[in-house]
Amino acid sequence: MTSAIPPRTVAIVGAGPGGTTLAVRLRRLGYRVVLVEKAAFPREHIGESLTGECAIVLRDMGFGDAMDAAGFPVKRAVTVHGPNKLNRFRVPVQRLGEDGVIIPGQTWQVRRPEFDSLLLNGALAEGAELIRAEARGVLRRDGRISGLRLRDETGKDSDLAADFVADASGLQTFLSRSGVCGARHRGGYEKQVAFYGQFEGARRDLAPDDGATHIFYAARHLWAWFIPISSTVTSIGVVTPGALFKASGQSVQEYLTAQLASLHPELSERLRDAQPVSETWSTSNYSYHIDDFAGDGYLCIGDAHQFTDPIFSFGVSNSVQEASLAADAIDGYLTAPSVDRMNPIHTYADSVSRAQARVKTLIDTFWEFPLAFLKLAHYDRQADIAELLSGRLYSQSAETNEAGVIMRDLLAKRRRAEATPG
Ligand SMILES: Cc1cc2nc3c(=O)[nH]c(=O)nc-3n(C[C@H](O)[C@H](O)[C@H](O)COP(=O)(O)OP(=O)(O)OC[C@H]3O[C@@H](n4cnc5c(N)ncnc54)[C@H](O)[C@@H]3O)c2cc1C
């Protein structure tokens, strides 16, 4: 952009990790960026375990030192515990170098109020503006989106003009609910409920794996997470089919307590001396995807258009990677001659859809073919699975990842068999 032209304005709904990453990237490309956030920060949020790829994005933006200084636990691995103690596997945070050499990596487990504030302050330091208000609808001029309609906490309405609107509103899916995107589809994992809280005194692995995530698998779609989020506090959650919870007749608190005692022997052992230090939270029906999530003058990133299942902690990682791709797409849209301006938007939608399909392949295989998944992760394709579970799902190499190809074939074979009559 030439300095004679005033910078174009991009309005971003939501100042979670996706929104703030996009804000930083766009500021560095010279845009005026206005973040619209309805919550007062710091605020609680689910999503505490980051992937290796997410750490690479954060370091690339220059947040590495601040993340280290915040004292977030270092995550070097995820251990998945099968229903009995024999079939457990540990997946290190690592990546494959271009020559196939394994490069050990690490990332962080975060306390979201502090993490999200750190990123928001970083975006403000880059010159992004923040409006504390709820986006209530979009403005249109000649049929195209031209800004946002806002309502602040005193109930006062105002309009924000913008050359482009990005939706990073997470599960609120603002642009979809405003009728801008296409249809919303429920995902295959939508009938699940998650119950979670924070505990002190949970037994961790010894250093250097004291920051490791543990996943305890009990049965199909019934599992628990164990994520150290400070030197003493561990986030523990149980994800369960909604029908099981309903049939139990228990309160949220009773159900969580009962599941923590019975879901997996190793989890109960680790929690023997643990005490809750937070309230118990719950969330349900969070699996969906939305059509036409990028179009003329708008796009959605992260949860604002798709969320599949939290089992592999991809949420924040996907949002920040999509934010990075979105910054280039928005820049392309706003600088290309008008006849070409949709090309970068289509490229964005295509890359993101492909990556989300890889996420779904991984998760579907884990639930539909647990033994095949275990074999790949533990024996046959360790490095490939570690690459995917480190969140490297948006790169070209993810398309040819051999474990990914095997999983795609497995699921396709099953779909063909199901479609064959008799
Ligand atoms: C049970 C469960 C467990 C999870 N565990 C993990 C995990 O371990 N690791 C992980 O990476 N992810 C996890 N996730 C996913 C993670 O929570 C999200 O993917 C992640 O927070 C998405 O980031 P985001 O920036 O896209 O949106 P968010 O972090 O949700 O931020 C959206 C922001 O938009 C604001 N907003 C919404 N609507 C409006 C509006 N109309 N106007 C103004 N502001 C608005 C909200 O206040 C919020 O601050 C989990 C999810 C679930 C359901």
Image (tube, rainbow, N blue to C red):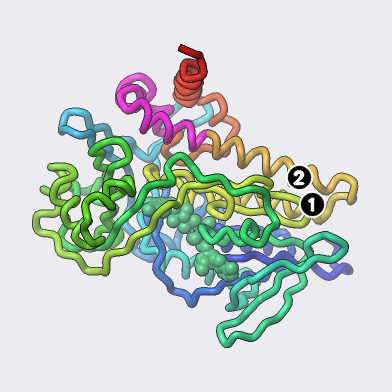
- Identified by mark 1, the residue type is Tyr
Left or right, 244 with respect to 323, comes to left
Say which mark, if any, is on residue 30.
none
- Residue type pointed to by label 2: Pro
Residue extending furthest front?
Answer: 422
SS category of the residue bearing label 2: helix
At horizontal 70% and vertical 81% (from top left) the residue drawn is: 158
Disc 2 packing (10 Å; few <14; some 14–19; many ≥20): many
Work out which residue is located at the far top of the displayed protein and give it.
422
Residue 173 placement: quadrant: bottom right
Q: Is residue 70 above or below residue 134?
A: above
In reply to whether residue 158 is colored magenta, the answer given is no
Picture quadrant where residue 11 is located:
bottom right
- Disc 1 vs disc 2: Cβ atoms closer than 8 Å? yes
Could you say where residue 215 lies in the image, as x and y percent from the top left?
A: 28, 43
Task: Inspect this view and state whether residue 370 appears.
Answer: yes
Q: Over which residues does the magenta segment extend?
A: 358-386
Q: Is residue 369 magenta?
A: yes
Q: Is residue 49 visible?
A: no
Q: Residue at x 73, y 77 (%)?
A: 159
Residue assigned mark 1: 333
Q: Quadrant of the N terminus?
A: bottom right
Q: Residue at x 77, y 57 (%)?
A: 297
Main SS type for the magenta part?
Answer: helix
Residue 369 image position (x, y, % from top left): 36, 25
Q: Position of residue 299 (x, y in %)?
A: 68, 53
Secondary element type, mark 1: helix
List the residue tagged with mark 2.
Answer: 344
Ligand 1 closer than 8 Å to the CB at disc 1?
A: no
Instruction: Confirm if mark 2 falls within 8 A of ligand 1.
Output: no
The one of 13 and 52 positioned closer to us in this rendering: 13
